[in-house]
Structure formats: structure tokens, C-alpha cells
């Protein structure tokens, strides 16, 4: 298995594509990003929360971590969240990576680039990017806490509705060149696959950014990544009583009010 990180591999791949403005931008952002790596247990926890109580994430969207001066890079092994079938065209995926960066035009407008490394070592990225606006998350989280249902499918659908997807012109040209001389429908199918590969990761990306807001970080790896682990949240008898009274699902995210900004407690 390759020993380099997905971040370094993606930066190297994009750096070699000197004629692509979008790839050069990705390389610059990845090189400058603050890097995080989720442990397998943290990945499994996010997956379980999205599977059982995604509304706890929806209620906390105004408290998730966003880039502050520097882009954020998050990577993790795909195995702990893989169930039936394999993502990304049926190929076995080794690592998933998210590049989260503010838009140059508006620091509250966020852009997400999704990348992955196959078990064979080859690196890929979606040719579409995901967008959301931080202020939309603030408004939506407040509505979700007070007005919306706690139904799993409804919560996931509402979070998906918070994002939009676009295909940059340069990426569209690359996809067109890859299918030059072929049926036009193959090119359109490839573009749609790129949109699905990007947008389908949005809820999990929100969950990862919520984990960054919790107390599970601090340790650094030898290659400079900040390690995000499942926090050791010891729940005392009073805490457990309050959990039952509040009908608080476990595992889940709990939004906490702060003097200036809210925070997130991760209950495993």
C-alpha cells in the first residue's frame, strides 16, 4: 500500500497538470491547508450518527468548523464506513479526502473538493465541486432545532438541499477530452458521475467538520496531520438521566451554547 498521504499524492498529481488552472489551484490550497486525519473509530462514529440520528448533526450545523485563514484538508480510510457494495464505480477505495476552502469572492461561501485513492494507489478527484454558505447553515440549524422533524431520511435530504454542485469549465473540458469521439451521452454520464461523487459526500463532510469542533483532537502524526479521535466522553449518572429526559440519541452530536459561539459535544 502506498505510504504517502492522499494530500501529498493529490498535490503531486495536480502539480503535474500545469495547463489546468483548476488543478493548480487545488495544489496550492492542499499545500497550504491545515491537515486532519480521522481515526477508524472516528469515521465509524460519524457513519453511525448519520445512519441513526443525522438530525443531531443538522441541529449543530452552525457550530461545525470552517476554514479560518487557511483551507482545511481532511482524510480518512474508507473501510470503517463501507457496507454493501463499493463506492466510486465499484472500485475498492483506500482513502477519502476533503479539501474545504472559502471562496475568493466571499469568505462565508465554502467550496468542497472530494478526492479518493484506490487500493491500487491511483488517485482521483471528482470533476465537480460542492458549495454551501455558512450563513445558510446558521439559519437552517436554528430552524432544524425548533421546527423540523427528527426523521432520518428527512434530515439527510434537508442537509443535501443546503449544498449546490457545479462543474468548473476547466474540468468540463477535461471530461470532454476524455470522451472525445465517443457518444455524447457517455460524456454527460461522466459529468453526472462527477456530480454524484461530490454531492454524495456532503453529509459526511459536515459530520467530519463537526468532529473537528469536538474535543477529540490535539495529537499529531509524524507526517504533520492533526489526529481526530473519538473523545472519551464519560457520562455520569446525572448525564445519563439528562440524556433520557432530553430523548438524546446515542451516539450523536450535541450543540452547546457558548458565551460567543456555540460548540459541539460528541457523545459516543
Image (spheres, helix red, strand yellow):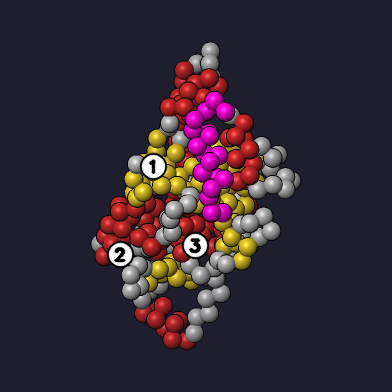
In percent of the image, x 65 and y 48: which residue is there? 5
Q: Of the residues under marks 2 and 3, which one precedes in the sequence?
A: 2
Residue 172, percent from left and from top: 46, 26
Q: Which mark, residue 104? A: 1
Which residue is disc 2 drawn over?
A: 145
Calculate the distance from the C-alpha at mark 2 to the C-alpha at mark 3: 19 Å
What segment carries the magenta color? Answer: 18-35
Q: Is residue 100 magenta?
A: no
Q: Nearer the viewer, residue 135 or 56?
A: 135
| Residue found at x 36% / y 79% | 245
Give how far across and how far down residue 93 sits, in percent.
63, 44
Name which residue lies at 53% across and 33% down.
23
Query: Callout 3: 10 Å neighbours few (<14), some, many (20+)?
Result: many
Query: Is residue 31 inside the magenta stretch?
Result: yes
* Secondary structure mostly seen in the magenta stretch: helix
Instruction: Estimate how packed mark 1 is, as few (under 14), some (14 to 19) or many (20 or more) residues with alpha carbons within 10 Å.
Output: few
Camera-near label (1 vs 2) is: 1
Distance from label 1 to label 3 (Cα)?
A: 25 Å
The answer to whether residue 86 is above or below residue 253 is: above
Q: Which residue is mark 3?
A: 211
Let me know if residue 192 appears in the view.
Answer: yes
Q: Of tags 2 and 3, which is closer to the observer? A: 3
Indicate left or right for 36 with 257 as reference. right
Which numbered circle lies on residue 131? none
Circles 2 and 3: CB atoms closer than 8 Å: no
Q: Nearer the viewer, mark 1 or mark 3?
A: 1
Q: Earlier in the sequence, mark 1 or mark 3?
A: 1
Element class at badge 2: helix
Amino acid at each position: 500500500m502506498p505510504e504517502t498521504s492522499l494530500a501529498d499524492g493529490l498535490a503531486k498529481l495536480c502539480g503535474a497538470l500545469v495547463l489546468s488552472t483548476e488543478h493548480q489551484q487545488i495544489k496550492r490550497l492542499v499545500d497550504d491547508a491545515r491537515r486532519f486525519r480521522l481515526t477508524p473509530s472516528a469515521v465509524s462514529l460519524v457513519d453511525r450518527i448519520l445512519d441513526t440520528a443525522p438530525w443531531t448533526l443538522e441541529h449543530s450545523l452552525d457550530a461545525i468548523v470552517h476554514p479560518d485563514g487557511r483551507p482545511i484538508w481532511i482524510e480518512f480510510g474508507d473501510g470503517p464506513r463501507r457496507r454493501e457494495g463499493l463506492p466510486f464505480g465499484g472500485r475498492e477505495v483506500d482513502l477519502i479526502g476533503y479539501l474545504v476552502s472559502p471562496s475568493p469572492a466571499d469568505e462565508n461561501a465554502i467550496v468542497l473538493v472530494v478526492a479518493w485513492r484506490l487500493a491500487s494507489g491511483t488517485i482521483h478527484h471528482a470533476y465537480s465541486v460542492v458549495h454551501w454558505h455558512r450563513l445558510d447553515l446558521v439559519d437552517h440549524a436554528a430552524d432544524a432545532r425548533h421546527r423540523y422533524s427528527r426523521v432520518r431520511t428527512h434530515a439527510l435530504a434537508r442537509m443535501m438541499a443546503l449544498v449546490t454542485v457545479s462543474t468548473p469549465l476547466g474540468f468540463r473540458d477535461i471530461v470532454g477530452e476524455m470522451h472525445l469521439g465517443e457518444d455524447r451521452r457517455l460524456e454527460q454520464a461522466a459529468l453526472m458521475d462527477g456530480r454524484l461523487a461530490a454531492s454524495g459526500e456532503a453529509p459526511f463532510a459536515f459530520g467530519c467538520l463537526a468532529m473537528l469542533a469536538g474535543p477529540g483532537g490535539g495529537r499529531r502524526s509524524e507526517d504533520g496531520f492533526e489526529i481526530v479521535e473519538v473523545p472519551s466522553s464519560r457520562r455520569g449518572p446525572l448525564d445519563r438521566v439528562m440524556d433520557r429526559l432530553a430523548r438524546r440519541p446515542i451516539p450523536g452530536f450535541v450543540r452547546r451554547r457558548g458565551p460567543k459561539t456555540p460548540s459541539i459535544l460528541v457523545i459516543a
